Amino acid sequence: MSAGYISGFEVGDPPEAIASRLLEDGGVYITNLVAPEVMDQVYAEIQEGATVESQKSDTSLWPEGNKTLGALAATSSTYVEKLIVHPLVLEIVDLILRPAAPMIRDKPENQQNFEIAKIDADSTQVVIKPSSELGPNCDHYNLGAGVMLEVGAKSDQNQILHRENAIYQPYVEHLDMREFIVSTMWAGTDFTKENGATRVVPGSHRWPEDRIATEDEIVQAVMPKGSVVLWLSRTLHGAAGSQTGERRTGFFASYIPDWFRQEENQLIAVAPEIAEHLPDRARRLVGYSSSPTLGWVKGRDQNNLLMPGTSGPIG
């Protein structure tokens, strides 16, 4: 990989090759993954109940003149059915977040087995013992956030380059972790250099946190409507400013291990009465499921917490 270059893939390319390049470079894009009409439908659905006020943004991370809108999993069935559970995207996320390798990288001593040790005739204790046995990063993964991010016409200010892992700092900085977030930005319009296509710094996921990118290391994800760009937790990225009179709309979705707090509170954003109508895979992504030890509700089904069943250690 050379500075200022991001690899592009097409429909039909193997997910293993895409995931491998994503891990190597920190970002990739896939062209024409869904039809342009799908993106129009997502936009129409999320705008149906939205107000001008609800889309305003004036933070340093998303400057005034641009638009944001959250809770997309609750407002657009097309976003749910066609984007966040797209089979190719989920195959790639599986390979990144649930590989046959431990979360604590290259440290077998940190992989632990549970054993029951006998204290005396009446007492026992759980003992955690080191093991070289490898396992996945998580039982399953959830939707971290589902947000529309729109660069306004003639909003010429570049977004601050940032990393997704910043939202979990300083809580995880002491861990030598594998990648723990896969982010996606779907092109709701054509992404061009002029209208604010997402900027990515390939290789920055391997940099020290305090290294500053140079202009020749930044590349834009120029891609047609219906395409998607993916990046990792430590990859520097941000929207470019627009030099045109047209909007540049992206639909964001991130994927995180089930044991991480979701960036956007999906259980509030997507109420149970909405979640019960989602496809099974989408409902689990939103968070209405549990691992064997985390997120369980006694008397509820582990794979669908809206239904009766057994879940968790005392289910």
Image (cartoon, grey):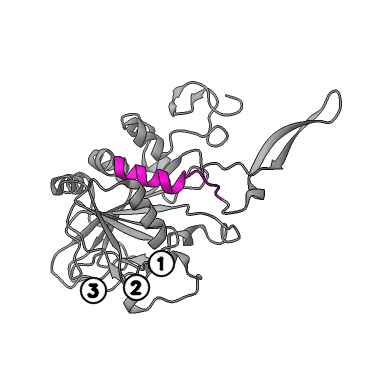
Identify the main secondary structure in magenta.
helix
In the image, taking residue 290 as reference, residue 17 lies left or right, namely left
Which residues, given as a range, are shown in magenta?
A: 87-103
Crowdedness near tag 1: few (<14), some (14–19) or many (≥20) residues, C-alpha within 10 Å: many
Judge whether residue 89 is colored magenta: yes
Q: Is residue 56 visible?
A: no
In the image, taking residue 190 as reference, residue 53 lies left or right, namely right
**x then y, percent, for residue 42:** 20, 46
Q: Are marks 2 and 1 in contact (CB under 8 Å)?
A: yes
Mark 1 lies on a secondary structure that is loop
Judge whether residue 243 is colored magenta: no
Residue matched to label 2: 3
Q: Is residue 116 above or below residue 225?
A: above
Residue matched to label 1: 203
Front-most of residues 258 and 154: 258
Pointer 1 or 3: first along the chain: 3
- Residue at the spot 35% in from the left edge and 30% down from the top edge: 280
Q: Is residue 72 above or below residue 289?
A: below
Pointer 2 or 1: first along the chain: 2
